[in-house]
Amino acid sequence: MDLIIKIALYAPPILLAITLHEVAHGWAARYLGDPTAANLGRLSLNPIKHIDPVGTVAVPAILLVLGGFLFGWAKPVPVNMQRLNDPKRDMALVAAAGPASNFVMAVMWAFAMKIGLMSDSELMRLVLVEMGKVGLFINLILMVLNLIPIPPLDGGRVLSGVLPDNLSMALAKIEPYGLFIIFGLLALGVLRFLLEGPLSFFQSIITKFVGL
């Protein structure tokens, strides 16, 4: 497939996945009492507001060229935990909102694939099936990756919200080293191993639900 066509088909679902993931955090935070992201204009569907030059562009591009496991991140939406109605509980809900949005988008892209497969138009079939494949995959990657219980990933914040205070504080001490741990797991090939099972499980559930 021509590179320009690939970019045209792959960019929209990838940008939508990372944009809505971050916006979901901001929406949840505002609903639960913290308008910080809204006040800073981060509840926008404009992907430029959420792109991190390193995590969204450089790291995925390098991994793509090297043929490695696709991995990256967007610019985090700011959340002032102290302004939430119930800081500990609500921070866990705010964190969970991102992966939840990716699950919903994965289901929607699966439906797009099904519509494409049923279409009589070859162009419609190409666009919806290819975009749907990418949308399904990237959203499941973002969901499963972010649910790893290592801060600052969303899973770490969710776990912190349900643990007793002493264990929650101990987990928080890992946060400055969290990304180094993830990169270490990636370099050792452990990250791919950890993600493959959950990815396959959720993909199977969604495709069966949609009827693909």
Image (tube, grey):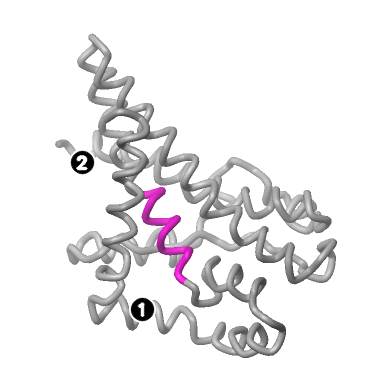
Name the residue rendered at 60%, 71% in the picture: 157
Residue at 21 percent across and 66 percent down: it is: 68
What span is in magenta?
Answer: 138-148
Location of residue 110 (image quadrant): top left
Would you say residue 98 sits in the magenta stretch?
A: no
Residue 9 visible:
no
Q: Position of residue 62 (x, y in %)?
A: 27, 65
Is 64 positioned to the left or the right of 164 in the image? Answer: left
The one nearer the camera, 211 or 103, is: 211
Q: Residue at x 41, y 63 (%)?
A: 145
What residue is shown with label 1? 183
Label at residue 3: 2
| Crowding at mark 2 (Cα within 10 Å: few <14, some 14-19, many 20+) | few
Residue 155, placed above or below residue 151: above
Residue 160 on image: x %, y %:
63, 76
Q: Amino acid at mark 2?
A: Leu
181 relative to 119 in the view: left or right: right
Q: Residue at x 55, y 73 (%)?
A: 156
Q: Nearer the viewer, mark 2 or mark 1?
A: 1
Name the N-terminal-most of marks 2 and 1.
2
Residue 151 position within the rendered picture, expressed as x and y whole percent measured from the top left: 54, 76
In the image, which disc is placed on residue 7? none
Say which quarter of the image contains residue 109: top left
Task: Locate residue 159, reporting x and y percent.
Answer: 58, 73
Kindly report the secondary structure that dominates the magenta region of the rendered protein.
Answer: helix
Let me know if residue 26 appears in the view. yes
Spatial CA distance of label 2 from label 1 is 28 Å
Badge 2 element: helix
| Quarter of the image that includes the N terminus | top left
Q: Residues within 10 Å of mark 1 (few under 14, many from 20)?
A: some
Q: Nearest the camera: 28 or 179?
A: 28
Dot 1 falls on a residue whose secondary structure is helix
